[in-house]
Amino acid sequence: MRNESLFGHHDEPTAKGVHFGMLEPSESGGAPSSIDLLRDVPLEVQAQLGKSRKLVKDILKLNVGSVIELDKEADEPVDILVNNKLIARGEVVEIDGNYGVRIIEIVTR
């Protein structure tokens, strides 16, 4: 296929070779497995207490001390999402003054 530039010249596309580096062996000493290649990929993990839909006018009325009612009961498990995909459910726990989530269910597809 030929490309015509603004100046009326016809340029042929050129292809260049690509050199890929060698893959390093996994900890087991063999070639890396598919999961070994992904171990250092960062993922966003969220614990979602619940959700609520509000109109813009209601959001603009929020102040310090306002309460937003969520769609879950207080004793229901929280959703654990990885990259916005539900993967598990858990219960909120406190560890040395910080919040955490103990997984109680892995969500299967």
Image (cartoon, rainbow, N blue to C red):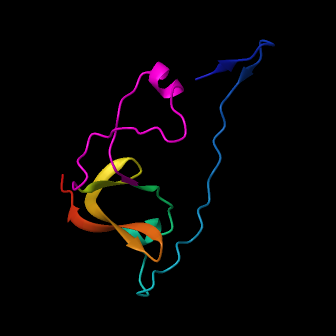
| Residue 95 drawn at (x, y percent) | 42, 75
For the record, the magenta segment spans 47-76
Judging depth in this view, the residue of 85 and 5 nearest the camera is 85
- When asked about the image quadrant of residue 22, the answer is bottom right
Nearest the eye: 27 or 2:
27
Q: In this view, does 7 lie to the left or right of 92?
A: right
Residue that appears at 34% across and 50% down: 49
Q: How many marks?
A: 0
The residue sitting at 25% across, 45% down in the picture is: 72
Give percent across and percent down for residue 94.
39, 71
**Figure check: 77 above or below 33:** above
In the picture, the quarter occupied by the N terminus is: top right
Main SS of residues in magenta: loop
User: Magenta stretch containing residue 54, yes or no?
Assistant: yes
Q: Which of 26 and 56 is in front in this view?
A: 56
- 40 up-or-down from 75: above or below: below
